[in-house]
Image: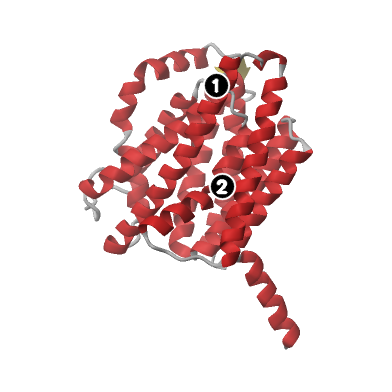
Amino acid sequence: MSLRVTLATTGVFVGCCSGIVFLELLVKLDPGAGNLITAAQFAFIALEGFIFTAKLGRAKRIISLKDYALLVIMFFMTSVCNNYVFKFNVPLTLHMIIRGGSLISNMCLGTLILKRQYRISQYIAVIMISLGIFICTYFSSRQLRNDSYSTEEADMFWWFVGVLLLVLALFVSSYMGITQELLYRRHGKQGREALYYTHLLPLPFFLLLHDNITKHWSLAFESPAYRLPLLGVAVPLMLLYLLGNVLAQYLCISSVYTLTTECTSLTVTLILTLRKFVSLLFSILYFRNPFTLYHWAGTLLVFVGTLMFSNVLSWRSTKVNTVKNK
């Protein structure tokens, strides 16, 4: 494994896992800060791309803005939905599990749009993933129903709205992946350019969310202060968490883009699956999130199904048999 792949893999685990930690710290202080978090992430990555990818506007663009248009709209929608659902009392553990079921939407859209055919083991894997997500969703809804602060029907309604938004974002994200794949077939893999423009072009859309973002930006300044040891300056705690999340998200997503240009899709899928599992475990253990035996069973089905779908388990079995035959 090359140094570039090693660094990118490390970046995925460090960036994505630490990003989840900062995200959970943020939503615990302000569950409605999703739009503020998303806007900050987009602005930082766009600024970095303008300096280092666009060379302050001097670099020539490979893919036209017209081709980027649909990709940008879908990326904006999924990013806003994925962060905004915390306002609807969706637990972070369930959030990660549903997003871990992206293979279901990929398979559906791949069959309908790209006319792809799949192995029997992959269909079984999708059934396992679907069952795992259903189990986790069902028992999370039961737990929400039993909570003393969430017994009203209105709370259950908005919880279901949050789950439906996550599922919608899942399918939009899968369609975005297909669009990106078709785009790269025509223009080659322009990972850094795509990363830059998919974060730059949606920035005007955040003007539509100006009131919400401004409100939660003000709330961030009203959060408890933390005195920096070396500087002796008190800084709002939420701003520190926001900065940590933005930097972690940049490391995470830039590392993923690097992996897609250096590794096969099988390797990238395996790395991201393991990363999600590590994030889930850390979230449960460190933040002591409620997680029952049923949640563990559902999680196991989701991740084993993901490995089966990407052919990791059968690849491992074949490798072992080859070694034995030698």
Give the mark toward the camera: 2 or 1. 1
Q: Are marks 2 and 1 in contact (CB under 8 Å)?
A: no
Say what amino acid the circle numbered 1 marks: Phe
- Where is mark 1, residue-wise? 157
Judge whether 279 appears above or below 143 on screen. below
- The residue lying at 57 percent from left, 68 percent from top is 1
- Where is mark 2, residue-wise? 101
- The residue lying at 66 percent from left, 34 percent from top is 138
Q: Kindly state the secondary structure of the residue where label 2 is placed.
A: loop
Q: Kindly state the secondary structure of the residue where label 1 is placed.
A: helix
- Distance from label 2 to label 1 (Cα)? 23 Å
Extreme-right residue of the structure: 293
295 displayed left or right of 6:
right
Q: Residues within 10 Å of mark 2 (few under 14, many from 20)?
A: many
Judge whether 22 appears above or below 220 on screen. below
66 displayed left or right of 136:
left
Residue 23, by quadrant, is: top right
Is residue 232 visible from the viewing direction of this image? no
Say what amino acid the circle numbered 2 marks: Gly
- The residue lying at 46 percent from left, 49 percent from top is 254
Query: x%, y% of residue 177?
Result: 40, 52
Judge whether 105 appears above or below 164 on screen. below
Residue 326, by quadrant, is: bottom right
Query: x%, y% of residue 275?
Result: 61, 49
Judge whether 283 appears above or below 227 on screen. below
- The residue lying at 31 percent from left, 29 percent from top is 205
Towards the viewer: 10 or 210: 210
